[in-house]
Amino acid sequence: MKKARGDLTRGSLFRHLLRLSVPIIFSYILQDAFNIVDMIFVGRLGPGAIAAVGVSGNLLRLIGVFSLGVSTGAGIIVAQYLGARNLAQAEHVAMQAILLSVFFSVGVTLVGYPLAEHGLRAVRMVDPEVLRLGTTYMHITLAGISTMFVSFTLGSIFRAGGDSFTPMIVLIFSTLINIVLDPLLIFGLWGFPKLGVAGSAYATLIGRGAGVVVLLYLCWTNRAPVSLRRVQRRVDFSEMLDILRLGVYSSMQGFWRHFSRLGFLWVIGPYGKTIVAAYTICMRLRILVMNPGFGIANSVSPLVGQNLGANQMERAERSTKIANLLGAALMAVIGAVFLIFPRTFVGIFTPDTTVIEIGAVYLQFLSPTFGFIAFSLILGRALNGAGDTRSPMVITLVSQVGVGLGLVILLSHFIGLNGVWLGIALSNVVQGIVMWLWYRTGRWKTIELVKRVPKTA
């Protein structure tokens, strides 16, 4: 491996975990800090704009699961080949993953663009303002969705090589562009066009695109864990199928997770845009508060992957245990803070007292489950790092769609809106417990991905 600091098969696991997770956590916090700023700007346009961006964001995240599949599959294989000291094959896999990201993003744009408004109507958004603004936001984002796909894949490749610091620096650069452009394009400051919700979409697209250019440049100039300069730039369908074979289950896991979110919106939609706005704000808060969990989870996957590639099973297990204890404890503490001060956090996004009160109730149901969410995230990523992407997908399907959406529909009929909040909370608890029980079976230890006889790239 080119960089000693990228070798996760030696040294302190706790230090490796911190070195990987801290930049990832900071990256997520930075991104969500922008999302908060973005929502504050959009919030000044009214509840309709908040609902439009929130619902559109959920639909776009559902579409974005295709990028999750490619990036996850690539990260798993690259990490294991790096652990096995087969740099040439790791670089070959990285190139195929980037090509896959471009192919899928073009397909998503062609299919999704004409169906944007239908997607909003499918989750029972009937308010004319929400439909108009949401369709515009989705059209702009879909036109440039290749920046999301390639960005996710490159970030996963860097982390697979033990480098989470570089993606963080690039994200800072992208986010600064985004934050500067946001008020300029939303409100038309300093001679820029006043675009409203559309301005938010354009700012995100430009910032993310700039980040992709920087990451590709680093890969081309040998300043990344893998180099693209000496790789043959040709399509290898066999390697692409290997990536997809692993990634398809991660895509489906993301699909079912976001499908359940859209199902929740389908239930909430008839309550009106005020309820939708409160739900949207709380989901943004949930993502923000889960950043430490996401950071630790995304660190444990390359740790498990590289150590399994190097045939160090016990070390892979210990890395998961350390990450799980740290993540669950940290998330439980943060959940307690949100439980005590729910109105303070919801009030950051909106001055509307009705939205604040509704959101505060939802947070009081949601925040005690943060530790269970961390459990499911970290153990799911550990299983992914071992090459088991199917089991987390099945567990997500059962807990989020079967238990979560099922309970939300059922309880909403009997106890109204509080039934929605209770159903969502219970699904998080079930997913965390079931993920732990499956990990404890140890079946993931029998999976072997690395071809011990190197294949020429």
Image (spheres, rainbow, N blue to C red):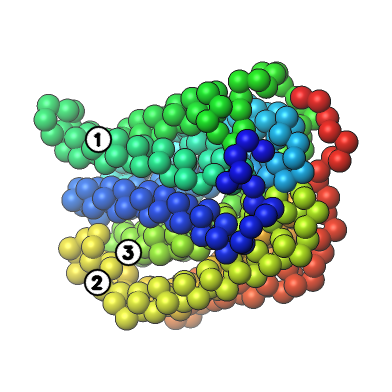
Nearer-N-terminus badge (1/2):
1
Q: Is residue 28 above or below residue 356?
A: above
Q: Position of residue 298 (x, y in %)?
A: 56, 54
| Residue name at image x 60 percent, y 39 percent | 3
Label 2 sits on what residue type?
Thr
Where does label 3 land, which residue? 278
Nearer-N-terminus badge (1/3):
1
Where does label 2 land, which residue? 344
Between residues 342 and 125, which one lies in front from this camera angle? 342
Q: Position of residue 189 (x, y in %)?
A: 13, 34
Label 3 sits on what residue type?
Ala
Where does label 1 land, which residue? 181
As measured in the structure, the alpha-carbon distance from the residue carrying label 1 to the one carrying label 3 is 26 Å
As measured in the structure, the alpha-carbon distance from the residue carrying label 2 to the one carrying label 3 is 13 Å
Secondary structure, mark 2, is helix
Q: Are marks 1 and 3 in contact (CB under 8 Å)?
A: no
Q: Is residue 65 above or below residue 228?
A: below
